[in-house]
Structures are given as structure tokens and as C-alpha cells.
Amino acid sequence: MQVSLDFVCRSINGRIIEGNDSHIITGVTTDSRKVEAGMLFIALLGEKCDGHDFVRAALAKGARAAVVSRVTDATFWSGEDKTLILVDDTLQALQALAASYRRCFDIPVIAVTGSVGKTTIKDLVALYLSSTWKTLKTQGNYNNDIGLPLTLLQLDESYQVAVVEMGMGALGEIQRLAAIARPQFALISNVEPVHLETLGSLENIARAKCEVLSEISEDGFALINGDNKLLIETAREYSCRKYTFGCNGDCDFQAANCTVSNAGMKIDIRWHNQLETLFFPLPARRLALNIVAAAALAHLLGIEMDSIKDSLLDYKPSGNRLNIISLENGGAVINDTYNANQLSMAAALETSRELAGSGKYAAVLGDMFELGSLETEAHLNVGQIAYTSGVDLLITVGKLAQNIAQGALEAGMNPMQVHHFPTKAEALEYLQTRVDNQWTLLFKASRGMELETLVDELFARGCLVRK
């Protein structure tokens, strides 16, 4: 990144209160710990801390300038030449700067959104496109009002395409993100009962996800889940060109068959009377439709199917998403703790059972958040699914997860196989005496539970040993 402070000020309607606009900025951050020489530090007001408290530290570490929304005696810098820029709202300034900077690059931007699976699809699309073009993609959970602008601000002249993930918790958020990113292409994975606590209904979720379609240009297109009638109906309100993927025969790209083994799975994809078989090196049936969706989008963008096949062999899960760790004596840990809802819980339980084969299989499941009125029902349903998926040992953690245990018992699971613990500490004490390296262990809960700490502790204490 190489932009002048003059460009920054014009983009964010900022007023310089110290220094001048002659400096060149080489990067942007909102985290003073990540400051490097030449960067612009933007002081955001967060729920837990206020970036204005770290302005002086950021400047001392090498930031060339800082954007602030209020000024105190402690904010000003009296040392070497630095610049302070005053704005009304620093978050809006970050977004305005990203929108202005994105317009400096005439490259395709692909937006990926949906209730479930968007991160996996984003990673797969980027993987496929990287075989031909240098590709920028959203890292980690940078899919919100802060993360998406920071992703776009990483663009430079070497990138040929960008794949950005868009999350949301309310109506209007994806519209705002799309206006910043201005995508030519979009993929909507699905519409499921996630974020019901804030959105209230599936219809509102569908409307929120389809907001991205308002920014798709005439020469662009959207790829949407053709199995979801509500999504199809909502998308009809937008005039952009559309293609569909799904399992039913009416979809433009059909996931025709999926065969799973311990080595991975073969997925047949059919379109325009053509049939190809993709091999995915993980036995994760729940990802089959995501793989087809990403392959369809890449193919529509001009990537050859043979190249897609080759790229797929190199897929590695990102973060704590289906991270499979092989153990001594034949067991495995499936760390899928990034997030959870009823649909993803069911899929993870199914995948873990397939991976365990005839071996011992335990599921450690925690609270699922943001389910609104479906909160109790969803947890009870997950318990029933745990029973029917053949879990040998069910450990539930947290206040809400008690209903998972209850659902399993009501479905007929032996009470000796079900154990509930209010806290992670209590669950850890039980697990370290109960499981060993012969077990296949699934860990899954909503992000706020931070259930991955159980995985870390079991390895740190030597209860589990990597192969």
C-alpha cells in the first residue's frame, strides 16, 4: 500500500489537527500491537477498549499518522513529525477509506455470504482462483464492518482478484459491506435459522443475505443455492444475472453424488450435460455442496475443471474448522470450535461418525448462541442427532448445552453415556480421566464458548498425543 495522507483526508473528510498531509502511508491498522513503520493507526471505540487510549503508543511504535474522533492532551504527539486527523466517527472513516481505496483497483471482487459454510466456500474459491491469478482473500473472521475494510486495504497492484466474505447480524449490514467492496460477483450459500435473535425470521435472513445482489454489475452474476426456495424467491427481486447450484436436477450446477471413505470423498458435479468427479481429501460429507458451489463459481469465472481438481487436493481447513488432528493409537481430534448452529452441529456429528468408523467416538458439545426463540428446541434437536449419529460418549458444556444432554436422553441414549458440566474446567477434569488416544473426539460450540481451550489443555496435560 502506498497512499498519501492527502488521499486519506479527502476519502474520510478528515481535518488535520497536527502535522501535515505530505506523508505516504504504507498500511492501515486498528490494533496498536500490529503497528509497523509508516502505517496509519485508526482509533476505534470498541466494546472492551478504546483505541484512543493507544494513539501515543501506536505513534511511538512507528505509525506515521493516526485518525481520531476526539482529542485530549494525551492524544497529541510532541516528538518527531507525525500527523493527527480528526473525524466525526472513526469506524465510518475506516469504511470510507476502504471504499475509496478499493476504487483504485480495476479487478474482480467476489463476495461470499450465507448462513452456513461461507468461510469454507470463500477459502475454496480463493484456492481455485489462486491456480491462475494472485488472489486476496478474507483472513479469519474479518467479514464484518471492521474486518472487510481492513481486508480491502491490503490490496496492492500485484493482486488480480479478491474474494471477500460478508457476515451480518442485522438487516442493512451486508448492504453496507457491499457498497464498500463493490463486488462484480456474489455467492450466497444458503439461508438457515442463524441470527434469529436479531433478525426474527427466515424471511428477514433471506432479505439480509440478498442485499449483496444490489451491487452486482450488469456484466457480473450471482450464484445462489437452488435448493432453497426462500432464497430463490427473495433473489428474484434483484435484476442481476443468476446461476444456481444444489442437489436438485433443476440447478445449473448439480451435486449429483457423494461417496465417502476414510481417505476422503468423491463428489460428482453435473452441468450442461457434462459430468466431472472431484476428490476432496477429507471425509466431510457436509462440505460436498460447498465444494460444488465454489467449483461452479470458479468455473464460471474461467478456471478449467482440471485445475479445480488439482487445487482441491491441497485444501487445508482454516482456523478451528474441521481441523482434524491424528492421535497415537488410531484416534483423532476434530476441532470444529469456530462456531455452531443446529445445522452445522448435525453435519459435524455425521462427519465425525464417518471418520471414527467402528472406533470409539465422543462428542464434546457446548452452547449455541443467537438462536432466538428456537434456542431450547435447537439444543434438544442436537441431542437427538447426537444419539442417532451413534455417539458413544456425549459430554455437554454450558448452561444452554444442558438441553443437548436432555435431548439425547429423551431420544433413548443410555444415561451412562451422557455427562453434562456447567463449566469447561469441570468438563476437562472428567475428560482427562475418560478418553485416550484411541478415541475420535469432536469438539464443537459457538465461538463465545472458546471450546478449543479444552483441546489445548488435553494436549498440554499429555492426555492426548499427536501422531
Image (cartoon, rainbow, N blue to C red):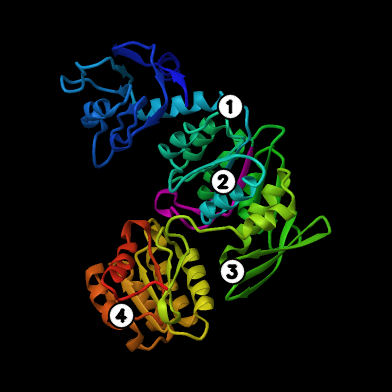
Q: Which residue is mark 2?
A: 112
Q: Is residue 423 visible?
A: no
Tell us which disc is closer to us: 3 or 4.
3
Marks 2 & 1, CB-CB < 8 Å contact? no
Q: Position of residue 409 (x, y in %)?
A: 38, 83
Marks 3 & 4, CB-CB < 8 Å contact? no
Q: Which residue is mark 1?
A: 105
Span highlighted in magenta in the image: 185-203
Earlier residue among tags 1 and 3: 1
| Mark number, residue 285 | 3
Quarter of the image with the C terminus in it: bottom left
What residue is shown at x 36% (from left), y 57% (from top)?
Answer: 447
Q: Position of residue 299 (x, y in %)?
A: 72, 49
On the picture, is 229 further left or further right than 269?
A: left
Residue kind at label 3, given as amino acid type: Arg
Q: Residues within 10 Å of mark 4 (few under 14, many from 20)?
A: some
On the picture, is 125 further left or further right than 240?
A: left
